[in-house]
Amino acid sequence: MRNWWKLMVILTPLALGGCYRPEYPSKFISSDLKEFESYQKKCASRPSPPARAITSLGDTDVFITYSQPAVKGRTIWGDLVPFDRIWRTGANEATVLSATGDILVNGDTLLAGNYALYTIPGQDKWTVILNTKYEVWGAYDYDQSLDVLRFDVEPSTNNDLSERMQFTIDDTGVIEFAWDKLKFDFLVMPL
């Protein structure tokens, strides 16, 4: 028993290591494309590398920054990503929707800024959530009281397998999510 403290010195860092969350990198959501590309290059070897979808709607830039998990032969919906539970809609850092000007999202006003984009996947409908607390890793620190928008979308079957999760934004403001054989979309417009 005299050396119990030595055992504690060895075991404490191991126990706390499981709770480790990396510091949130500001370059992840930087509107400076060169900063983001530098971060993207630095993290390219991650199993779920960072990616960005971007478009300009008039004078407003809209972009979604996220990390791209892969299917890798796994069952995604209802297994890896459980139904009816909050999901970061990606991997690593929370997925972030950013707008340099005020926009309409599915008909509701969203002020310029950065917002975590969470979802609650369901078998017949998904709830899309925009939340002001975006500088987080995953959905561990999700706080519903900070939601600014919530709306439902209907997922559909994608004819082609999307091995890596992806967002796209076309020049009309349609944001599409696709992963595995599932997709959904919603509309953003300048105010």
Image (cartoon, grey):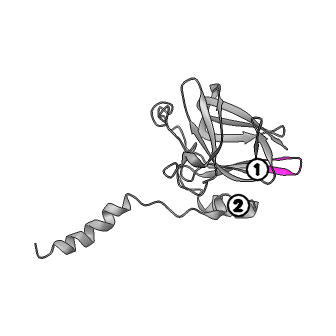
Query: Which callout, 2 or 1, points to the residue nearer the camera?
Result: 1
Segment tinted magenta in the rendering: 55-61
Measured from the top left, where is residue 140 in percent x and y? 48, 50
Q: Residue at x 58, y 50 (%)?
A: 94
Q: Residue 30 carries which label?
A: 2
Task: Give the residue displayed 26% in from the left and 70% down from the top.
Answer: 10
Q: Residue at x 26, y 72 (%)?
A: 9
Q: What element carries label 1?
A: loop
Q: Does the magenta stretch include residue 142?
A: no
- The residue at which mark 1 appears reads as 111
Give 41 or 191, whichever is nearer the viewer: 191
- Which of the labelled discs sits on residue 95, or is there none? none
Q: Are marks 2 and 1 in contact (CB under 8 Å)?
A: no
Could you say where residue 33 lies in the image, as x and y percent from the top left? 75, 60
Observer-nearest residue: 129 or 180? 129
Q: Quadrant of residue 45?
A: bottom right
Quadrant showing the N terminus: bottom left
Amino acid type at image mark 2: Ser
Image: 134 above or below 168: below
Q: Which residue ends up furthest to the bottom in the rendered image?
A: 2
Q: Is the magenta stretch mostly helix, strand or loop?
A: strand
Which amino acid lies under the numbered mark 1 shown in the image of this protein?
Leu
Q: Name which of mark 2 and mark 1 comes first in the sequence.
A: 2
Image vertical order of residue 23 relative to residue 175, above or below: below
Crowd rating for badge 2 (residues with CA inside 10 Å; few <14, some 14–19, many 20+):
some
Q: Is the residue marked by circle 1 packed among few (<14), some (14-19), or many (20+) residues within 10 Å? A: some
- Secondary element type, mark 2: loop
The answer to whether any part of residue 36 appears in the image is yes
